[in-house]
Amino acid sequence: MSNLEKILNELQDAQISGDHLNAAEASSAAGKIFLERNIYPEAANYFRKAASLFSEIGKLIQQASMLNQLGVCLVMSAQEEQALEELAAAKRCLAKEDHPALAAAIEGNLGLAYSGLKDYKNAARHHKSVFETAEKINDLQLKLNALINLADSNLQDKKYQPAQGFALVALDLAKTLGSKPSLMIIYDLLGMISSRQGDLKTALEYHQQSLDSAQENGDLLRQGIALANQALAQEGLTEMDRAFKLMSQAQDIFILLNSDYQEKTSKDLERIQSSRSVDS
């Protein structure tokens, strides 16, 4: 019997016996398994059930945690408007509770939901709140996450100087913490910021560092993203053969992973190939 099957049996037994606490905990555990597997609709169903059960027995912090997890699932499913509603409900649960780490997690996910809606000013506002909480409770990893999200939301809002500032501070902190997964993302952000500023050679250097970090971590998706971004920088430098080669390598990875990036990369390849044909 798999761990998931065991948990679902426990959930069924708890529901039959009317044990709301055990039912809530089992539903939460099932949701986490589905979330780890990126099966967001199923995960959302179990987190919603757990939140309802925790509400019935007056466990507000646990209810807030489940609503926060539900918000994550909805953001990942591109249901940002609904995510905002669930995350707002999570905040209400914590109105009279002292749980800064969970409150910060909710704020961070609100920021991600607003980013999904392309409301980058509100996104930055929530990520700033996370940053302030991280400083108050001296949580360096939380601070790092907030800096990365602040850099990204400012980049999307075309505020390149603030974005670069947040990204460079994040880079120093990630190196201090030895956070290799964060380094992949930060180098990628710095590369995109440099591209927007017209410094394509520096962008290439940052994307190469992102690629190196991704290879060290065995993160294929991030390798593909770094290669695609290198290709775009080479395209900007009118190095079309190099751009085509790099974008083809990225596409091979996205096909292998069955990634949503395939569609965009295919269009990029068509555009680059057209430019190569004109040049030849």
Image: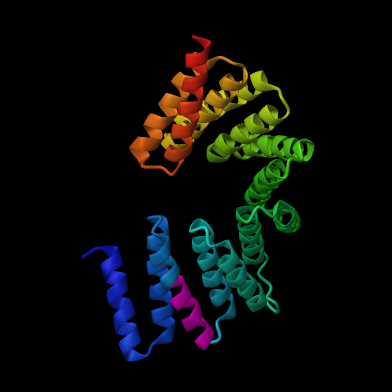
User: Residue 270 vs residue 121: left or right?
Assistant: left
In percent of width and height, residue 211 lies at 51, 28
Q: Quadrant of the N terminus?
A: bottom left
Can residue 178 be seen here? The reply is: no
Residue lying at the far bottom of the rendered structure: 18
Can residue 106 be seen here? The reply is: yes
For the point 64% across and 32% down, the residue is: 192
The color scheme shown is rainbow
For the point 62% across and 21% down, the residue is: 236
Query: Which quarter of the figure has residue 100?
Result: bottom right
Q: Does 254 appear above or below 247?
A: below
Q: How many marks?
A: 0
Q: Does 185 appear above or below 39?
A: above
In percent of width and height, residue 132 lies at 76, 56
User: Residue 203 vs residue 250: left or right?
Assistant: right
Query: Which quarter of the figure has residue 190?
Result: top right
Residue lying at the far right of the rendered structure: 161
Q: Nearer the viewer, residue 241 or 14?
A: 241
Secondary structure that dominates the magenta span: helix
Residue stretch rendered in magenta on the structure: 46-56
Residue lying at the far left of the rendered structure: 1
User: Residue 142 vs residue 15: left or right?
Assistant: right
Q: Does 209 appear above or below 92?
A: above
In percent of width and height, residue 101 lies at 64, 63
Q: Does the magenta run of residues contain 114?
A: no
In percent of width and height, residue 7 lies at 32, 71
Residue lying at the far top of the rendered structure: 280
For the point 44% across and 33% down, the residue is: 266
Query: Which quarter of the figure has residue 250?
Result: top left
